[in-house]
Amino acid sequence: MAEASRWHRGGIPKHKLPFREEEIRTTPQELLFYIIFLIILCILTFGMTNPHMYYLNKVMSSLFLDTSVPGDERSNFKSICRTADFWKFMEGPLLEGLYWDSQHNDKSSRIYYENIVLGVPRVRQLKVRNNTCKVYPSFRPLNMTDCYAKYTSENEDVSDFGLKHDTEWKYSAPSTNSPWHQGFVGVYRNGGYLFTLSKSKSETKTKLTKLQQNSWITRGTRVVFTDFSLYNANVNLFCIIRLVAEFPATGGILTSWQFYSVKLLKYVSYYDYVIASCEVIFFIFLIVFAIQEGKKIKEFKSAYFKSIWNWLELLLLILCFVAIFVNLHCNIQNFLLLEPLLKSTEKYPDFYFLASWHIYYSSVIAITIFFAWIKNMFLAIIIYAYSEVKTDYSIDRRPDFELGKMIKKCYNNVLEKLKLKKPEKDEDDKDIKSTDLAEQARREGFDENEIRSAEQMKKWKERLEKKYYSTEIQDDYQPVTQEEFKDLFLYAVELEKELHYISLKLNRVMRKVSALPY
């Protein structure tokens, strides 16, 4: 009986709460927990970026890409299409940009006074062997005997050529650290024919002239890389620059470039230590999420993998662990390689390897935060849906607030006194009127059963309309009890009987009307 009384009040026993109500209770906690995780992830994502990265890239690209060749305002690195144009750029805008501060020939150059050139720049080319493709026999009489195919590692030329006594004429084996380069018409590995520039502008110009006169670039040349690195102490940023000139088998030159501004010196300021603490918190959150997903997999087994959202959870976890691994690898490589590279003042310091790993980390963390926001949107939709149906599982509802009824009653009284509304009859007048109607029905010969049935239907109608059709509570959902459901059912049965009785009467009337003579 205790349970029945709770049911009539619209509730159920507290110890038998359904699972969906437990979800309603726990999902907001999960959303709050996940929002904190998302905030930490956003701090890590945007904390490693710096507005100065964009401006440093913009300044350097304008200097080396948009500066015109002397005597030809329309010619720059972007417009190179011939070998002669390439050498004009090397001896013109490139030298003027690298040796911008020409007063310090014996020291490291400072571009725009603030960006120091680390070590010395390096120029590297990759070639293919002759006869890596076949000439159709009919064209051999036209003096077409040589054939240089597109670049592949199998077609690469590794033999010495030209003067053969300097490193720029001898093949250097590729390094195992630096990544391969994806160009327009090929994927190029490391190594090749290298020469480094000097700290002296005049010596560098002499070396470039010598290379041009001795045909360092041949028909077999497929790509030339110009690599150098800068450091700006004002914003603690390294700028790693690569200018690429591809010589495709079709002829001509295709130019491309890469400007990477990265922060290799970490944990210098207080803000950096805040980022470091966020990295630790992020790892703790990730361990907690991994444990939760492991429990779900153990509980649901194969059924766990039937939900696409569970796959999203797993994908997000994998991406987070990959991001942690890449970031850890970047920090380890910075610790091992940064100091030796900075000491290489007379050699080319290969910062491109370190910059590439930071780019990988940026890409992974960007993909991670994308899927993290998708999951956040999904959780928000769940919370919204549960808030819409939460009243279905409410317990011990609070009574309606009476202030609205009091205001409405005062409002109606004012309208009645101003004679703008007819006064409403009280319940006693309604009872008297109902009694008079019953007596009148008896006098007109209605059966007592019909009168009692009509009175019962009227009571049901008034009670149900008072609860479910009142304008005072039209926006408030009211749960249906067992007793009210019984009243609704009986009321519907009686309405069906009345409709059937009225239908029979209408049929008799229609038959009589159709029988009338016209």
Image (cartoon, grey):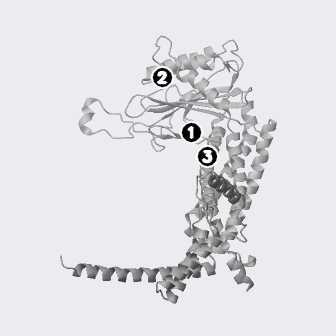
| Viewer-side residue, 202 vs 368 | 368
Visible in this render: residue 196?
A: no
Task: Please tell me whether mark 1 sits on a helix, a strand or a loop.
Answer: loop
Give the label, 2 or 3, closer to the camera: 3
Callout 1–callout 2 Cβ contact below 8 Å: no
State the residue position of label 3: 366
Q: Residue 419 appears at what percent x and percent y?
A: 60, 53
Q: Which kind of residue does numbered mark 3 sit on?
A: Ala
Q: CA distance from mark 1 to mark 3?
A: 28 Å
Q: CA distance from mark 1 to mark 2?
A: 21 Å
Q: Residue 101 appears at what percent x and percent y?
A: 67, 15
Closer to the N terminus: mark 1 or mark 2? Answer: 2
Callout 1–callout 3 Cβ contact below 8 Å: no
Direction from residue 432 to residue 103 in the image, left or right? right
Q: Residue 185 appears at what percent x and percent y?
A: 44, 38
| Viewer-side residue, 212 vs 239 | 239
State the residue position of label 1: 190
Q: CA distance from mark 2 to mark 3?
A: 37 Å
| Viewer-side residue, 315 vs 164 | 315
Direction from residue 397 to residue 187 in the image, left or right? left
Placement of 209 over or under 465, stated as above or below: above
